[in-house]
Amino acid sequence: MNGATVKVYSKTKDGNKKLSANFKVREFACLDGTDTIFISDELVSILQKVRNHFGASVIINSAYRTEAHNKKVGGSANSQHKYGMAADIRINGVSPKTIATYINTLLPDSGGIGVYTSFCHVDVRAKKSRW
């Protein structure tokens, strides 16, 4: 698993398209309003598994980011968000650490998982990274 299948969407044309049972294209859009959205199929699959496991809505704070927006928000220069392979998520009533612990069972040997105060970062990079 390495998140290699990334598809390109248009927020205008594809925004309401369902990617899985609970996720639509528009939820992955860059917060700067850009129409183009890159989304990894594997990332969608992981997020759907998280949704099913906790039985609660997964709120995507940030997914795809343009280079400019990533810089503006202080993202890493090689951020997986820029490639459509990362999402910062939260679930009301579930701690970011609890979410991260579950995602670790889905990506035991790969992917990036970061625990922050109010959200959990998940990405589908080939190498394992935790913070």
Image: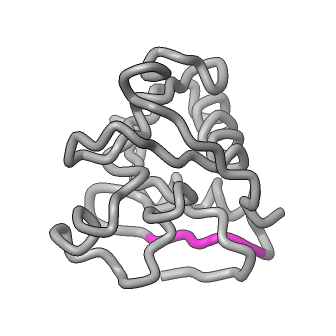
Q: Main secondary structure of the magenta part?
A: strand
Q: Is 106 part of what is drawn in magenta?
A: no
Say above or below: 117 vs 118: below
Q: Residue 111 sits in which quadrant?
A: bottom right
Q: Residue at x 42, y 69 (%)?
A: 115
Q: Residue 90 sits in which quadrant?
A: top left
Q: Residue at x 64, y 44 (%)?
A: 7
Residue 35 in picture, x, y percent from top left: 34, 37
Say above or below: 32 vs 55: below
Q: Residue 2 sits in which quadrant?
A: bottom right
Residue 59 in picture, x, y percent from top left: 38, 36
Please give left or right for residue 46 compared with residue 120 in the image: right
Start-end of magenta stretch: 110-114
Say above or below: 73 vs 45: below
Say above or below: 103 vs 131: above
Residue 109 in picture, x, y percent from top left: 80, 75
Of the 4 image quadrants, the one containing the N terminus is bottom right
Q: Residue at x 41, y 50 (%)?
A: 63
Q: Residue at x 46, y 82 (%)?
A: 78
